[in-house]
Amino acid sequence: MTELNREFSAITDDALEQLSQRIGKKIEKTLEPWCHESTRDNIRHYAHGIGDDNPLWCDPEYGRNTRYGDIIALPSFLFACNRVGSGYVGGLPGVHAMFAGCDFNWHRVIRRNQEIRSEVYLKELIEHETRFAGRSVQQIYHVDFFDSSGDLLADADTWCFRTDRDVAREQGTKYDEVKQRGDVSYSPEELEEIYQYYANEEIRGSEVRYWEDVEIGDKLPTMVKGPMTVTGFIAYAQGWGGLYIRANKLAWKMMQQHPGTGIPNRFGVPDCPERVHWDAEFAQVVGAPGAYDYGPERCSWLSHIISNWIGDDGFLTSLKSEIRRHNPEGDVVYIEAEVTGKLQEDDRHLVQFALVARNQNGELSACGSATAQLPSRS
């Protein structure tokens, strides 16, 4: 490859060595999370940010008639409770970070008005040579989440890929074909077909699904997300909390403290790197096909299809999800899930799932696996 016309920082051996010195060390001063507590509003804002209107998360009157006696938080709400665990990583200044997956384990229900505390450390760095951006680094963090009593709510490994923006722009990527296809467009008839999935979406709710009634090979109803809009991306940021989304003086203060967060926009004004999610021109500069959705948002969609199906008395115990491509404006994502196993561990009756999400062209957007506990008749 010819010498790059560089606009951004590259991954260097020195920077990588400095970052590796942090492995295994607890991060004592983490960035303030968007949500410290699982309040009614915080839970609802996150749920609505992924398009989830389950009354178990959103309606206190409904919640009072469940075994919990109140609303509870959806499992993926914890993405709003730790910045590092949801993709805001340290080290390698100026090098683009893309959230790429998570491996979550939940141990307790997240009840309303819990103060949530977290501990996090850098677990591992893995180098890759990618088609998308040449030399890349997979940066894996481990996070533990605790409630106000000090009990472990959940633990997770989450990871980002650190990529060279300039290589991604100039080398050509898997998105070249997307750019050649041009902007997607939908007829009223096509939109009606997509929206029918929303009309048919079933929230199991209070109707108990028993472990004995589930069979390996059972398929869950297909869930749709999209067509993607910048408005939808912003709706997620409202519930999840974009670290770099700051206004006026607060934006200026952040850029004074962290100059790398101020990347000039078309007016020459320093603006945040997070604008790849609403600024199509800047997204293309870093090698993406256009403004696109958030990584934790995609992981949350995979938990959404499971929580809809297991009902109020089910409990999602684990989710592993891998992000495979961006979902730019205009894309529609179809999420499929299938029961792949049933097992008993002590007094727990568990169901295992395989999940896959593809866009309107059949291209893989995300994939994963999950386990949920269901009530038993025995």
Image (spheres, grey):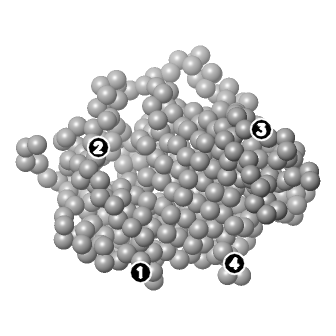
Q: Earlier in the sequence, mark 3 or mark 1?
A: 1
Percent of width and height locating residue 327: 45, 39
Vertical placement of residue 179 versus 101, above or below: above
**3D distance between C-alphas at marks 4 and 3:** 34 Å
Foreground of the two, 6 or 262: 6
Relative to 15, is 150 on the left or the right?
Answer: right
What amino acid does circle 4 point to? Asp
Relative to 264, is 186 on the left or the right?
Answer: right
Is disc 3 placed on a helix, strand or loop?
loop
Q: Earlier in the sequence, mark 2 or mark 3?
A: 2
Is disc 4 placed on a helix, strand or loop?
loop
What amino acid does circle 2 point to? Phe
Residue drawn at (32%, 35%), measured in percent from left and top? 175
Q: Is residue 165 visible?
A: no
Which mark lies nearer to you, 4 or 3? 3
**3D distance between C-alphas at marks 3 and 1:** 44 Å
**3D distance between C-alphas at marks 2 and 3:** 40 Å
What amino acid does circle 3 point to? Glu
Residue drawn at (67%, 52%), measured in percent from left and top? 371
Vertical placement of residue 37 versus 11, above or below: below
Q: How packed is label 3: few (under 14 Cα within 10 Å), some, or many (20 or more)?
A: some
What amino acid does circle 1 point to? Lys
Circles 2, 3 touching at the beta carbon (< 8 Å): no
Relative to 50, is 258 on the left or the right?
Answer: left
Residue wearing tag 2: 132
Q: Earlier in the sequence, mark 1 or mark 4?
A: 1
Is disc 1 placed on a helix, strand or loop?
loop
